[in-house]
Image (spheres, grey):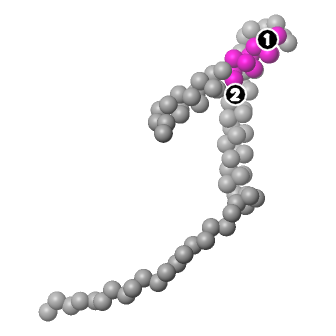
Amino acid sequence: MESRRRSIAKALSWRALAVMITALVAYLFTDNAAFAMKIGIVDSVLKLMIYYLHERAWVRASFGRAAVAVDVQPQPAVAATSSR
């Protein structure tokens, strides 16, 4: 099992790599490093927000969810005891 710190480190390293890839592609098209980095950062922030909204939409969707059987069994009655 991975720790939360490791998962966070992996997510952050992946986003950093994604920013660099986007910035590199933008640089190849524009030949402007500052503009390319801005594109990379804006792209990453925008995708993060859109991903969050996408996840929230899927939480509300019932598509592909299996019905969960709930086994409700009556609990035995607990006798009330009086202390006199």
Return the residue nearer the eye: 15 or 46.
15
Tell me if residue 80 comes above or below residue 44 in the rendering: below
Check disc 2 and report its element: helix, strand or loop.
helix
Return the residue nearer the eye: 41 or 55.
55
- The three-letter code of the residue at mark 2 reads Ser
Instruction: Give the residue pinned by disc 1.
Output: 27
- The three-letter code of the residue at mark 1 reads Tyr
Residue located 62% across and 67% down the image: 68
Residue located 21% across and 91% down the image: 82
Q: Residues within 10 Å of mark 2 (few under 14, many from 20)?
A: some
Q: Earlier in the sequence, mark 1 or mark 2?
A: 1
Q: Position of residue 33 (x, y in %)?
A: 74, 8
Q: Quadrant of residue 40?
A: top right
Q: Residues within 10 Å of mark 1 (few under 14, many from 20)?
A: some
Instruction: Give the residue pinned by disc 2.
Output: 44
Q: Position of residue 60 (x, y in %)?
A: 70, 57
Q: Is residue 2 found left or right of 11 in the rendered image?
A: left
Range shown magenta: 18-28
Image quarter (top left, top right, bottom left or bottom right) of the C terminus:
bottom left
Residue located 68% across and 30% down the image: 45
Tell me if residue 60 comes above or below residue 10 in the rendering: below
Which residue is the extreme one toward the front? 1
Q: Quadrant of residue 30?
A: top right
Tell me if residue 39 comes above or below residue 63 in the rendering: above
Return the residue nearer the eye: 71 or 41.
71
Q: Position of residue 52 (x, y in %)?
A: 67, 42
How far apart, in angstroms, are the residues tagged by discs 1 and 2?
A: 16 Å
Q: Quadrant of residue 59?
A: bottom right
Q: Is residue 55 found left or right of 10 in the rendered image?
A: right
- Residue 84 magenta-highlighted: no
